[in-house]
Image (cartoon, helix red, strand yellow):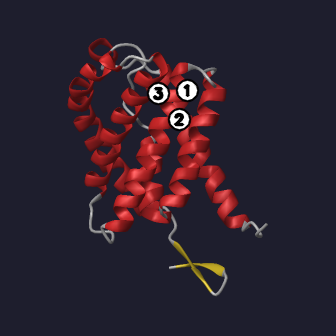
C-alpha cells in the first residue's frame, strides 16, 4: 500500500468537512423550492465544494470528496442508508465523475459554469434513475423535465460560487514525488 501524503489527507478532510457542513446546513434551512419540487428538494450547496475540487485537484479527489461528503452528511443528518441517502450518494458520485471527466477530456476548456450545469443535470438524472430502480417503477421519469428545469438556476449558482471557491484553494502539483505549490 502506498504512502499517504499528510498534506493531501488534511486537505481532503477539510474539504469533506466543509461539504458535509453545507450538506447538513442545507437540510436545516427552509428551502423555497420545496413547495414546487416536494420534500427532499435541495439547492445542492455541497456541490460547490465538489466543483471547486474538480477544478483545483481533479476527478479522483472530487469523487473521494463527494462520496465521503454524502456518507458523513448522511451520518450527521440521520439519513445514512435510507432512500434519501442512496439518492444523494449516487447523485453526488455520478455528478463528480461527469464533471471531472468532462474537465479532463475537454483539456480544461469547459468553464466552471458549464461543468456545474453538467453536474446538476447528471445529479438529477442519476437520482431519478436510482429512485426508479429502487421502487421498480420507471414512471418516476415523468418528473425529470420538471427537475431539470430547476437544475439550471441551481447549477448556475453553484457554478458561480464554485469558481470563486476554486480561486481561493491552494494549487499544488506533484513533482519529483512531492507536492509543491504553484
User: Image point 22% across, 24% down: which residue?
Assistant: 146
Residues at marks 3 and 1, CA–CA distance in whole angstroms = 14 Å
Q: Secondary structure at mark 2?
A: helix
Q: Which residue is mark 2?
A: 89
Classify mark 1: residues with Cα within 10 Å, few (<14), some (14-19) or many (20+). Answer: some
Residues at marks 2 and 3, CA–CA distance in whole angstroms = 16 Å
Q: Are marks 2 and 1 in contact (CB under 8 Å)?
A: yes
Q: Which residue is mark 3?
A: 26
**Residue 138 location in percent, x, y?**
34, 20
**Residue 175 location in percent, x, y?**
59, 84
Classify mark 2: residues with Cα within 10 Å, few (<14), some (14-19) or many (20+). Answer: many
Say above or below: 90 vs 31: below
**Residue 80 location in percent, x, y?**
63, 25
Classify mark 3: residues with Cα within 10 Å, few (<14), some (14-19) or many (20+). Answer: some
Say above or below: 91 vs 34: below
Mark 2 / mark 3, whichever is N-terminal: 3
The label on residue 85 is 1
Amino acid at each position: 500500500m502506498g504512502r499517504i501524503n499528510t498534506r493531501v489527507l488534511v486537505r481532503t478532510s477539510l474539504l469533506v468537512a466543509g461539504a458535509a457542513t453545507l450538506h447538513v446546513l442545507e437540510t436545516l434551512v427552509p428551502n423555497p423550492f420545496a413547495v414546487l419540487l416536494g420534500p427532499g428538494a435541495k439547492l445542492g450547496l455541497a456541490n460547490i465544494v465538489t466543483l471547486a475540487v474538480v477544478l483545483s485537484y481533479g476527478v479522483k479527489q472530487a469523487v473521494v470528496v463527494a462520496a465521503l461528503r454524502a456518507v458523513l452528511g448522511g451520518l450527521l443528518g440521520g439519513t445514512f442508508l435510507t432512500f434519501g441517502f442512496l439518492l444523494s450518494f449516487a447523485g453526488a458520485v455520478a455528478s463528480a465523475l461527469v464533471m471531472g471527466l468532462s474537465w479532463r477530456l475537454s483539456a480544461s476548456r469547459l468553464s466552471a459554469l458549464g461543468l456545474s450545469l453538467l453536474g446538476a443535470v447528471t445529479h438529477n438524472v442519476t437520482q431519478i434513475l436510482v429512485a426508479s430502480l429502487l421502487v421498480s417503477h420507471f414512471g418516476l421519469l415523468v418528473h425529470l423535465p420538471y427537475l431539470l428545469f430547476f437544475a439550471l438556476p441551481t447549477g448556475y449558482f453553484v457554478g458561480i460560487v464554485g469558481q470563486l471557491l476554486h480561486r481561493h484553494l491552494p494549487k499544488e502539483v506533484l513533482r519529483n514525488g512531492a507536492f509543491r505549490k504553484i
